[in-house]
Image (cartoon, grey):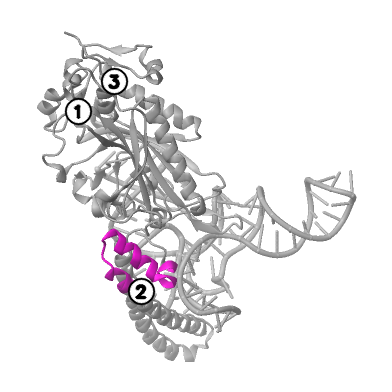
RNA sequence: GGAGAAUUCGCCUAGUGGCCUAUGGCGCCAGCUUGGAAAGUUGGUUGGGUGCAAGCCCUCGGGGGUUCGAAUCCCCCAUUCUCCGCCA
């Protein structure tokens, strides 16, 4: 949710942001109007309530013979107060409904435009050249007997798979490496719930734009999370953090579930786009003035992980029209996928400023001990999808795959996965 | 799943319709005291809204209700604990 004070003082800043996103600008004017109405209704209620409170005291201390008349008067006041209260509540609900629809104010440095208008920040590493026809990860997975898509589909349907043998171990190794790096950087590891209550899903903003991406269990009124960000953002819900002199950082590991409803026909081969995968997510709570610096740190940790996996990659600054509603700015790190001849997203890091924390009511105490809304940021550190890039970039002519050095300690020192025959 | 009990300002706690503008203790902050500290002592210490301000309003797990008036009475819900049942 946006800051109501910003709406009052600089509505034009919010209008400009909505324009940049290609979102509904008229919401801003509606919100300004409803805010005025709400405050007027609230003032009226408070005036009546104050009178009623005074009157109550009068009744209590009045002599017996006057009580009946005073009580009758009080009855009338009670009716008026109730009506004013209802009016104020209704006005507040109207306003809140609109406020929830307004998206986070875009950072001024975010490139304008839609999905195609990202700005390339950098390209790192050398794109591999092969003296043979490189195989895609699905073919390698089958050849090496480490990804079993056929049987995944047999038991769960399309977009499901088994990771098997070295494939399963490779994923766990990658998660271990990422978790170790995160721990060294001061992140606290969390294994999070993957089923959450509606209000948490709502609070993190996923029920809006991603509603049809989410699995829902009606019998229990619970949602399956598509990222541990949901649980990590909800972790300090309704809390006042004692200090954020240093950012509070969590590394959340969980299985993620996505319906991929709008992705029919896209990435049908292999495990590039699946209904279930694992992810290690970084999540930071910090002071709003620290958020941009923290965002840069998250990006840098992501790059470090890509480098440990010896993957060529590029970093892009995502354009305003392609930002999630909570994000003020977002960088994607994309790895080179040889068989597609292009870069594909492996990680994403968003600066949600105070937008998400305001919804979830997560605050911190400033130097003066006063509660203030915190800023939240998130960023991927490893996911199942990384296997695609690792397998394809490190494949050899004979179909074997060389394990990046940093991963070997978690795989019993093995240097290469070789075809079974 | 069934029965019972509980939920009060960071923690513990008092409070069974108006004197609750919520008690007391612990902790924390500030002053006094001291060479400095401890002890002692005085004061402060939920959060939010609204207003230029003084102030006013809301907040006793959440939501509804009864009442002129609710922490207190009634209903629904959530959570925790105890016992019973069932079960990886």
- Residue in the foreground of this view, choosing between A336 and A231: A336
Is the C-beta separation of discs 2 and 1 under 8 Å? no
Q: Residues within 10 Å of mark 1 (few under 14, many from 20)?
A: some
Is the C-beta separation of discs 1 and 3 under 8 Å? no
Q: Quadrant of the C terminus of chain A?
A: top left
Q: Which residue is mark 2?
A: A32
**Does label 1 or label 3 sit earlier along the sequence?**
1
Q: Which residue is mark 3?
A: A394
- Using residue A269 as the reference point, say whether residue A254 is left or right of it: right
Badge 3 marks a residue whose secondary structure is loop
Residue B20 in the image: state x and y as whole percent: 54, 71
Predominant secondary structure in magenta?
A: helix
- Residue in the foreground of this view, choosing between A365 and A31: A31
The reply to whether residue A385 is in sight is no
Q: Which residues are magenta?
A: A5-31
Asked whether the residues under marks 2 and 1 belong to the same chain, the reply is yes
Q: Chain of mark 2?
A: A
In three-dimensional space, the C-alpha distance between marks 1 and 3, rounded to whole angstroms, equals: 12 Å
Would residue A241 be counted in the magenta stretch? Answer: no
- Residue in the foreground of this view, choosing between A149 and A56: A149
């Amino acid at each position: 949710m946006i800051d109501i004070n910003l709406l009052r003082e600089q509505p034009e800043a919010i209008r400009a942001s909505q324009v940049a996103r290609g979102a509904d600008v008229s919401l801003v004017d509606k919100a300004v109007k409803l805010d005025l109405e709400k405050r007027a209704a609230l003032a009226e209620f408070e005036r009546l309530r104050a009178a009623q409170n005074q009157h109550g005291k009068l009744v209590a201390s009045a002599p017996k013979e006057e009580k009946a008349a005073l009580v009758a008067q009080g009855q009338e006041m009670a009716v008026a107060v109730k009506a004013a209260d209802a009016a104020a509540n209704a006005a507040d609900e109207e306003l809140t409904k609109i406020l929830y629809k307004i998206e986070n104010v875009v950072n001024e440095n975010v490139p304008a435009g839609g999905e195609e208008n990202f700005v390339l920040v950098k390209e790192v590493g050398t794109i591999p050249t092969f003296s043979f026809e490189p195989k895609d990860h699905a073919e390698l997975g089958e050849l090496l007997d480490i990804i079993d898509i056929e049987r995944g589909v047999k038991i769960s349907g399309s977009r499901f798979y088994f990771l098997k043998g070295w494939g399963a171990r490779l994923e766990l190794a990658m998660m271990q490496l990422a978790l170790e790096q995160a721990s060294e950087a001061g992140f606290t590891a969390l294994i999070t719930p993957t089923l959450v209550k509606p209000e948490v899903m709502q609070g993190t903003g996923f029920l809006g734009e991603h509603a049809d991406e989410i699995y829902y269990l009606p019998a229990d009124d619970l949602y399956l999370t598509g990222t541990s960000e949901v649980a990590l953002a909800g972790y300090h819900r309704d809390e006042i953090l004692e200090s954020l002199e240093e950012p509070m950082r969590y590394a959340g590991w969980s299985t993620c579930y996505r319906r991929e409803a709008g992705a029919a026909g896209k990435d049908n081969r292999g495990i590039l786009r699946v209904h279930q995968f694992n992810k290690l997510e970084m999540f930071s709570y910090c002071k709003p003035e620290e958020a941009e610096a923290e965002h840069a740190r998250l990006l840098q940790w992501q790059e470090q992980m890509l480098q440990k996996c010896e993957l060529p990659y590029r970093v892009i600054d995502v354009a305003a029209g392609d930002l999630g509603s909570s994000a003020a700015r977002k960088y994607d790190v994309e790895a080179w996928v040889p068989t597609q001849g292009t870069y594909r997203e492996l990680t994403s890091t968003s600066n949600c400023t105070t937008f998400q924390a305001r919804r979830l009511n997560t605050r911190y105490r400033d130097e003066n001990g006063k509660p203030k809304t915190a800023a939240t940021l998130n960023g991927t550190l490893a996911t199942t999808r990384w296997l695609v890039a690792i397998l394809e970039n490190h494949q050899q002519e004979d179909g074997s795959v060389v394990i990046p050095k940093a991963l070997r300690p978690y795989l019993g020192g093995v240097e290469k996965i070789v075809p079974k025959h």
